[in-house]
Amino acid sequence: MRCIHEQGVPMTEETETVAKPSLKVEEIRENPLLNRREVLFTVFHEGAGTPDRWIIKKTIAELLGVPVEHVIVKSLTTRARAWKTRGHAHVYDSKEELIKVEPRHLYIRNLPPEERAEALKALRGEKKGG
């Protein structure tokens, strides 16, 4: 017996396993003024939703051979039913440069899920108190 998934994909033993997302770096631009590299990339995630920023951030750091703390994912854009996400990330020479240049909300958005929850809680407490 076959049943149809919400997106219209037949659910069989072969299609129940989702393909692992893959990342392709499209372009890397040097920005010496801000001590960073600007990375344009595409993530292919057939059969799954857009991967979390943290996963994308770790993958970019691994591909470029830099510490994960030096990478920030700026934007992700997914078209409807495309299974492909285009993105833009910055890779800094140091964590201090990243913190100095990037907005705090983007820094928090790029934290691991556990740390992100704690940082948001601290930020909300800071807003209530001040």
Image (cartoon, grey):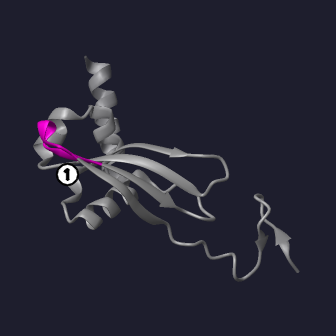
Dividing the picture into quarters, in which one does residue 99 lie? Answer: top left
In the rendered image, the quadrant that contains the C terminus is top left
Whether 23 is among the magenta residues is: no
Q: Is residue 51 left or right of residue 124?
A: right
Q: Nearer the viewer, residue 80 or 116?
A: 80
Q: Could you say where residue 67 lies in the image, as x and y percent from the top left? A: 18, 60
Relative to 2, does residue 87 appear above or below in the rendering? Answer: above
| Side (left or right) of 59 relative to 9 | left
Which amino acid type is marked by label 1?
A: His
Element class at badge 1: helix
Is 39 located above or below residue 100 in the figure?
Answer: below
Q: Residue at x 60, y 65 (%)?
A: 46
Is residue 33 magenta-colored? yes
Q: How many marks?
A: 1
Q: What residue sits 60% from the left and 62% below the top?
A: 48
- The residue under the point 28% across, 40% down is 107
Residue of label 1: 70
Mark 1 is surrounded, within 10 Å at the Cα level, by few (under 14), some (14 to 19) or many (20 or more) other residues, namely some
Indicate the position of residue 22 as horizontal and vertical percent values.
46, 67
Name which quarter of the figure residue 106 lies in: top left
Q: Nearer the viewer, residue 10 or 44?
A: 44
Look at 69% across and 76% down and name the residue there.
Answer: 15
Q: Residue 117, image x and y in percent?
A: 36, 45
Quadrant including the N terminus: bottom right
Per the rendered image, the range of residues in magenta is: 30-38
Front residue (pair 82, 53): 82
